């Protein structure tokens, strides 16, 4: 493979590409909406199907497990067989699985359908982002397109509680899954007409042992992270974590020896790509943990229903959408590193506001602080994604997109595990120090475990004793939220500095329009790109 510098400005996208972006927006909206509506449907489907607590957890978690596990595999396969072909295959599978989930007659059937939804969803995510990279070569247009794509993802999260609540008020729980069917049918009709096909003509065959090793690396680590978040630290979680790490080492060693690897480790030689992934991983982890505790605060301290909590979080998604659309224009004028750093400092301010929330129902303050914090991460989300996709060679955009998505999944899972554990540790410590004397020992143990446990225990106690226990538990949880918010704010300041250090070499995208010649592509490991996407690699 020879690395050549382009001497002409990248071709600008036309009407067909922008209409194609609208087609890609449909499944993006659906994928995020599908996650948020299940939170509302879970009580209904559990009662109807008779799902046990363990089965409920699998109904919720299997979707994310499968997405995280298969992203790398499908991203690589899309580079080989064609991103549009993989997208349409995934759309068909997602539509069928949605119908199966809607009419499931047992918990196990629903778990299986959710697994297929996750596997097919993993084909959609890297294909969508890779196609955007292939359709929009101009840095300014690509940044705008990625901003629109991420805004659709945020829009789905905001619409989920509203759409889910409306459907559940009028229909049965399966109706929330049927939302996916017409969207995927429309994608299957319009996709071949409006979306281009891109693939790597020199790619070899998919290495099946690498696929198995990839799954055996990712799934145990994600499982251990979720167990840590829900059950706290236990020796039993170390086994899957250790297994994932050991198999991961074997996976990496195999990729280094293959002529056509599942995960091309040479991509990490690109300083821009690897630095953007690192910053995004750290920020996603931090906000993932904060989001968990804010959601729990709204429901368990403020006493809101899942629908009400979702509606209160709509302003956060609305501000994030504004930030997503503004970030590419900001990065045209200043270096992306500075745009990301400014956003992360704004996030730190929002997190510090959360530390002023009390346990008496500070809904407005926690929502305001979270909205500011969430919006501040918008430049990081959009620009890091654009840096990853724009830095990869055209024939590797599917793999790069999969790496970006997997990075986000890992970040959120780790953040929930680590910061969730920090909040839980603070909660248990404060409950030990302030447990009301009249609470029986067995009930006190239940209350120490979690705020939901304290709520159940308080309901079984006499009026005044139960109220005292619940008050102490809410205060303890809020204290944990404060510690996590302070820690996250300090981390965001550190990440802002880190982004300037590792990404300051990337110049504003407007400079690539003025100086289209750029420098040699970095995938050969020889030089740094002067701008995002200013050079291409030709086979």
Image (cartoon, rainbow, N blue to C red):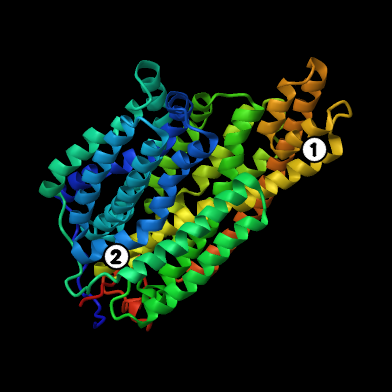
Q: Position of residue 531 (x, y in %)?
A: 36, 68
* Residue named by callout 2: 76
Q: Position of residue 401 (x, y in %)?
A: 34, 60
| Residue at the right extreme of this rendering | 437
Q: Is residue 532 visible?
A: no
Q: Position of residue 461 (x, y in %)?
A: 77, 20
In the image, 322 versus 232, the foreground residue is 232
Q: Residue at x 10, y 47 (%)?
A: 193
**Label 1 element class:** helix
As displayed, is residue 245 above or below residue 174? below
Q: Quadrant of residue 94?
A: top left
* Category of crowding for the residue at label 1, using alpha-carbon neighbours closer than 10 angstroms: few (below 14), some (14–19), many (at least 20): many
Q: Residue at x 34, y 27 (%)?
A: 174
Q: Residue at x 32, y 43 (%)?
A: 28
Dot placed on the residue nearer the N-terminal end, 1 or 2: 2
**On-image quarter of the C terminus:** bottom left
Q: Which mark is residue 431?
A: 1
Q: Quadrant of residue 162?
A: top left
Q: Which mark is residue 452?
A: none
In the image, 79 versus 377, the foreground residue is 79
């Amino acid at each position: 493979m020879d690395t050549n510098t382009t001497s002409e400005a990248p071709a600008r996208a036309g009407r067909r590409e922008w209409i194609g972006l609208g087609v890609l927006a449909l499944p993006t909206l659906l994928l995020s909406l599908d996650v948020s509506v299940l939170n509302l449907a879970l009580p209904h489907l559990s009662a109807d199907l008779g799902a046990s607590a363990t089965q409920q957890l699998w109904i919720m978690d299997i979707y994310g497990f499968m997405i995280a596990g298969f992203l790398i595999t499908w991203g690589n396969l899309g580079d080989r067989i064609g991103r549009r072909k993989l997208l349409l295959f995934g759309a068909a599978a997602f539509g069928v699985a949605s119908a199966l989930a809607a009419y499931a007659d047992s918990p196990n059937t629903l778990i299986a359908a959710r697994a297929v939804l996750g596997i097919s969803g993993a084909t959609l995510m890297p294909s969508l982002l890779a196609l955007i990279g292939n359709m929009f070569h101009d840095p300014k247009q690509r940044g705008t397109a990625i901003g629109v794509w991420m805004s659709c993802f945020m829009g789905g999260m905001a619409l989920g509680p509203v759409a889910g609540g409306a459907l559940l008020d009028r229909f049965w729980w399966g109706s929330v899954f049927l939302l996916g069917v017409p969207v995927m049918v429309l994608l299957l009709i319009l996709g071949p007409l409006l979306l281009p096909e891109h693939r790597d003509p020199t790619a070899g065959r998919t290495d099946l042992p690498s696929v198995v090793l990839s799954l055996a690396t990712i799934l145990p680590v994600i499982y251990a992270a979720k167990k840590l978040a829900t059950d706290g630290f236990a020796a039993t979680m170390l086994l899957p974590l250790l297994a994932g790490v050991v198999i991961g080492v074997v996976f990496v060693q195999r990729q280094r020896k293959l002529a056509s690897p599942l995960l091309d480790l040479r991509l990490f030689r690109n300083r821009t790509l690897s630095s953007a992934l690192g910053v995004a991983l750290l920020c996603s982890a931090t906000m993932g943990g904060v989001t968990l505790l804010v959601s729990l605060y709204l429901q368990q301290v403020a006493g809101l229903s899942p629908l009400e909590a979702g509606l209160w979080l709509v302003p956060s998604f609305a501000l994030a959408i504004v930030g997503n659309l503004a970030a590419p224009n900001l990065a045209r004028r200043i270096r992306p590193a500075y745009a990301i750093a400014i956003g992360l400092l704004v996030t730190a301010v929002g997190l510090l506001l959360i530390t002023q929330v009390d346990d008496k129902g500070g809904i407005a303050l926690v929502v305001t602080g979270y909205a500011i914090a969430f919006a501040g991460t918008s430049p990081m989300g959009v620009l890091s994604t654009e840096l990853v996709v724009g830095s990869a060679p055209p024939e590797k955009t599917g793999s790069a997109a999969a790496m970006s998505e997997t990075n986000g999944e890992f970040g959120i899972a780790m953040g929930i595990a680590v910061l969730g554990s920090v909040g839980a540790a603070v909660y248990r410590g404060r409950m030990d120090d302030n447990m009301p004397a009249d609470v029986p020992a067995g009930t006190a143990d239940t209350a120490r475990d979690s705020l939901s446990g304290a709520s159940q225990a308080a309901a079984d106690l006499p009026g005044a004793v139960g109220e005292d226990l619940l008050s102490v538990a809410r205060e303890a949880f809020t204290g944990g939220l404060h510690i996590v918010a302070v820690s996250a704010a300090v981390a965001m300041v550190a990440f802002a500095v880190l982004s300037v250090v590792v990404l300051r070499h990337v110049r504003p995208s407007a400079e690539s329009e003025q100086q289209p010649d750029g420098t040699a592509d970095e995938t050969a490991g020889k030089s740094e790109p002067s701008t995002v996407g200013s050079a291409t690699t030709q086979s």
